Image (cartoon, rainbow, N blue to C red):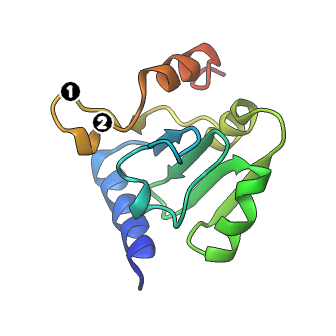
Amino acid sequence: MDLIAEKLAQASEFVRAAGVDAWLTLVRETSAGGDPVLPFLIEGGLVWDSALLVFPDGRSVAVVGRYDADPLRKAGHWSEVVAYDQSLWPELKRVLGDAGRVAINFSENDVMADGLAHGMYLRLVAHDVFRA
């Protein structure tokens, strides 16, 4: 098992143990930075806004722009790769479904756990991703 497959399996175990419905890593173009956890989840980078989700049942879903989709599919680590053309948010809402508790990456004290940029958090809230 390679590192990314191992980390996705481990993340699913943590999600299950934490009693949450999903773990969301939300990023924008990664060439200028990105979430510190990304090297453990994907090979290479992402160009469009992207949502990487891990569920307690072992599923992992990457919601990415269409140009990012093929490399992730070819890598074979993700259970499902959902490509979008115009906006991340409708697809993210669909994939999350009725998930009630979603873990996100942020930390006041640990830079390696503080992946969700404030601007992305504001966009997440503005698009009512967690509301039916």
For numbered disc 2, what is the local secondary structure?
loop
Badge number at residue 79: none
Per the image, the residue denoted by label 1 is 108
Compared with residue 86, is residue 43 higher up or lower down, i.e. above or below?
below
Determine the residue positioned at 42% across, 21% down: 118
Marks 1/2: CA–CA distance: 7 Å
Determine the residue positioned at 84% across, 42% down: 85
Compared with residue 131, is residue 97 higher up or lower down, i.e. above or below?
below
Q: The disc labelled 2 sits on which kind of residue? A: Asp
Q: Quadrant of residue 67?
A: bottom right
Compared with residue 98, is residue 55 higher up or lower down, i.e. above or below?
below
Badge number at residue 114: 2
Determine the residue positioned at 61% across, 75% down: 75
| Side (left or right) of 65 relative to 37 | right
- Image position, residue 23 (x, y; %): 44, 45
Determine the residue positioned at 54% across, 37% down: 99
Contact, CB < 8 Å: mark 1 with mark 2? yes
Q: Quadrant of the C terminus?
A: top right
For numbered disc 1, what is the local secondary structure?
loop
Viewer-nearest residue: 52 or 54: 52
- Image position, residue 53 (x, y; %): 53, 49
The outermost residue toward the right is 85
